[in-house]
Image (cartoon, grey):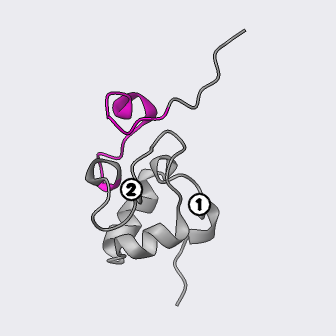
Amino acid sequence: MSAPWEWRTYCRAPINTIPRKVWERVIVDRKTLGWMEERYKQPDFCGYPEALAALGCWSLTSWPWTRTRKRCSKCDEFVNTKKPNG
């Protein structure tokens, strides 16, 4: 039976951009981090090796505290990918 909404809508999107309703569904459906790692990608600002793996970056994968660029900017693994203006 298919879900009432499409997983594919957000596939290969950076994990930090997944909307709350998707995270809620992931929890209800008891999806694993391995399942998430196959479908979503690590944000470009995160340099942590295999951050989405089970023992990766817990801050990045702990819902509802999924990290944003701003929140991760103090992390040692932060990679500044924004281009300067001008």
Instruction: Name the residue located 52 percent from the left edge and 78 percent from the top edge.
Output: 3
The front one of 51 and 11 is 51
Circles 2 and 1 in contact, beta carbons < 8 Å: no
Q: Which residue is mark 2?
A: 51
Q: Indicate the position of residue 59 as horizontal and vertical percent values.
A: 28, 48
Asked whether residue 18 is drawn in magenta, I would say no
Q: Amino acid at mark 2?
A: Ala
* Comes first in the chain, label 2 or label 1: 1
Asked whether residue 75 is drawn in magenta, I would say yes
**Numbered label attached to residue 10:** 1
Left or right of residue 46: residue 83: right
Please rate how many residues cluster around mark 2, counting C-alpha atoms within 10 Å: few if below 14, some from 14 to 19, many from 20.
many
The nearer-to-camera label among 2 and 1 is: 2
Q: Amino acid at mark 1?
A: Tyr
Secondary structure under tag 2 reads: loop
Looking at the rendering, the stretch of residues picked out in magenta corresponds to 61-79
Does residue 71 appear anywhere in the picture?
yes
Relative height, residue 9 to residue 14 (above, below): below
- Residue that protrudes farthest toward the bottom in the picture: 1
Secondary structure under tag 1 reads: helix
**Which part of the image, by quadrant, shows the C terminus?**
top right
Left or right of residue 79: residue 63: left
Q: Indicate the position of residue 63 as horizontal and vertical percent values.
A: 30, 54
Does residue 6 appear anywhere in the picture?
no
Instruction: Name the residue located 45 percent from the left edge and 61 percent from the top edge.
Output: 22
The front one of 16 and 24 is 16
